[in-house]
Image (cartoon, rainbow, N blue to C red):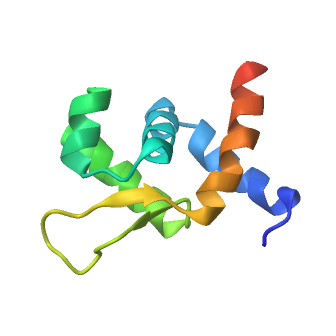
Amino acid sequence: MPSTDMLWPLVSIIKISKNRVKIVFELAKRPQFPSDLVKNLEIPFPVVSRHLKCLVKRGIIECYNPNQKKGKIFAISKTGEKLIPLLKTLLNNS
């Protein structure tokens, strides 16, 4: 399990983009398709796609079916769940 000190750089990666913050909090509610995120968050598909790739690469979220070309399902990862309280702390102090 990563220590809190090791989690702060990941929190920073999320915090630098308001769209990443929205995506992480939305995926913390339930697994979703990218099209659901586009609709629910009113963010253009290319932007959602770019942020999903970034967040998966860093282990903040995960794709349940990465080998599928279409119909991918994304959710918060175990590491991402640990970031939520830290992210809320930063957002409440902003």
| Residue occupying image coordinates x 63% and y 53% | 81
Q: Locate residue 73: give its quadrant.
A: bottom left
Q: How many numbered discs?
A: 0
Estimate the x, y position of residue 92 in percent, counting from the top left: 74, 21
Q: Position of residue 25 (x, y in %)?
A: 51, 38
Determine the residue positioned at 12% across, 66% down.
Answer: 70
Q: Residue at x 26, y 26 (%)?
A: 42
- Residue 63 location, x and y as percent? 37, 67
> Would you place residue 69 above or below residue 38 in this image?
below
- Locate residue 83, reporting x and y percent: 68, 49
Answer above or below: position of 79 versus 33.
below
What residue is drawn where x is 77% and y is 31%? 89
Residue situated in front as seen by the camera: 7 or 47: 7
Quadrant of the snapshot with the N terminus: bottom right
Q: In which quarter of the image is residue 37?
A: top left
Left or right of residue 40: residue 5: right
User: In the displayed image of the protein, which residue is found farthest to the front?
Assistant: 30
In the image, taking residue 76 as reference, residue 14 lies left or right, namely right
Which residue is outermost to the bottom?
67
For the C terminus, the quadrant is top right
